Amino acid sequence: MAYPIEKKLVIAVSSSALFDLGESDKIFREQGPKAYKEYQEDQLDAVLERGVAFPFIRRFLKINECFAEQQPVEVVLLSRNSAATGRRVFRSIHHYGLAISRAAFTEGKSPYAYIPAFNASLFLSANENDVQKAIAAGFPAGTVLPSPVVDDLEDLELRVAFDFDGVIADDEAETVYRNDQLEGFHRHEHANSHIPHNPGPLANLFTRLSILQKLEDKAVEQDRHYRRILRTAIITARNAPAHERVVTTLESWGVSANETFFLGGMKKGRILTILKPHMFFDDQKSHLGYESLDVPMVHIPFGVANRSPIDHNAPVFLAEAESPDEKTTGKVKPNAG
């Protein structure tokens, strides 16, 4: 029997993250919603080009093929389109053979409020404003940054990489670092090395991926020729002795990563260029500026690293997005750390 949605690992994705909607968005901005609707109707059978999140989503859905009885994962579409203009999106989904059947079309309104309704552990969107609202509401979300789409069909493995502080864990350590600098940070983390961090916005996603990996462990026990398809990594600027608290936190949650990198301030691009993850999540845009690597980057606008220098208690919001699945171009000042 398939898992009910409450027990599945669910990822919600906007059509702007899954497909390239640049041309559609341009028509909306320059000619308005009526022309946009007419354009989508005229292009109903024109297949949309793959977007930045496409390779990640395609591999994620392949997990169900390995565990056909359980069907442990699901992808849900959350879109600013109307159901009528969203028909082209679903026809493109069908063209590419993606097993996506559930959706919410909100006709210009941000769909982030429906993240918990679908039990989603992550909402991926190219719309920064929608993602910032989701994070402010306490929901797990990330902004897919523009990058070339690279989808090697012979590469079956799904590789997912995470920053630690402000992504898997909360922003406590980052706050200490900003207030007390590196020496104070190491002193604080050493003194609290036995105390687990509180969960960050993607803690649930990381934990549920670990559950899937345990399913793969059982598959290997039953069939030594089983080929694993999921690999996780943590890439953090921490180094010893601050690494202790990372280990303490993960052990307290009963999870682990396949690969863990404590870089001590080295550029994360050194690892990403070798690992080549299909998605890398970080809370600081200054760590995501590796456009030449062709690695899909997702910004998690959470915590002190994303607060205004004027108001340290409020999240930073960009201009209100108005178009369906709009690709915003607002820029956030990079942060150190």
Image (cartoon, helix red, strand yellow):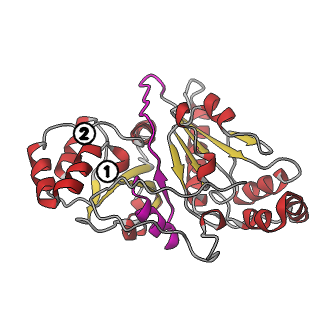
Report the amino acid beneath label 1. Answer: Ser
Write the start and end of the magenta stretch as one range.
Answer: 126-155
Quadrant assignment for the C terminus: bottom right
243 lies left or right of 82:
right
> Residue under circle 2?
48
Q: Where is 8 relative to 227, above or below?
A: below
Residue 247: % across, % down: 79, 52
Measured in 3D between alpha carbons, the distance from the residue under mark 2 to the one under mark 1, in whole angstroms, is: 10 Å
Residue 1 visible in this rendered orientation of the protein:
no
Q: Nearer the viewer, residue 30 or 204?
A: 30
Q: Is the residue marked by circle 2 packed among few (<14), some (14-19), or many (20+) residues within 10 Å?
A: many
Residue 115: % across, % down: 41, 65
Q: Nearer the viewer, residue 169 or 289?
A: 289
Whether 252 is among the magenta residues is no
Q: Element under label 2?
A: loop
Report the amino acid beneath label 2. Answer: Leu
171 lies left or right of 263:
left
Q: Is the residue marked by circle 1 packed among few (<14), some (14-19), or many (20+) residues within 10 Å?
A: many
Q: Are marks 2 and 1 in contact (CB under 8 Å)?
A: yes
Numbered circle sitting on residue 329: none
Q: Where is 225 relative to 127, above or below?
A: above
The residue lying at 8 percent from left, 44 percent from top is 42
The residue lying at 25 percent from left, 39 percent from top is 48
> Residue under circle 1?
15
Residue 229: % across, % down: 53, 34
Whether 133 is among the magenta residues is yes
Residue 197 visible in this rendered orientation of the protein:
yes
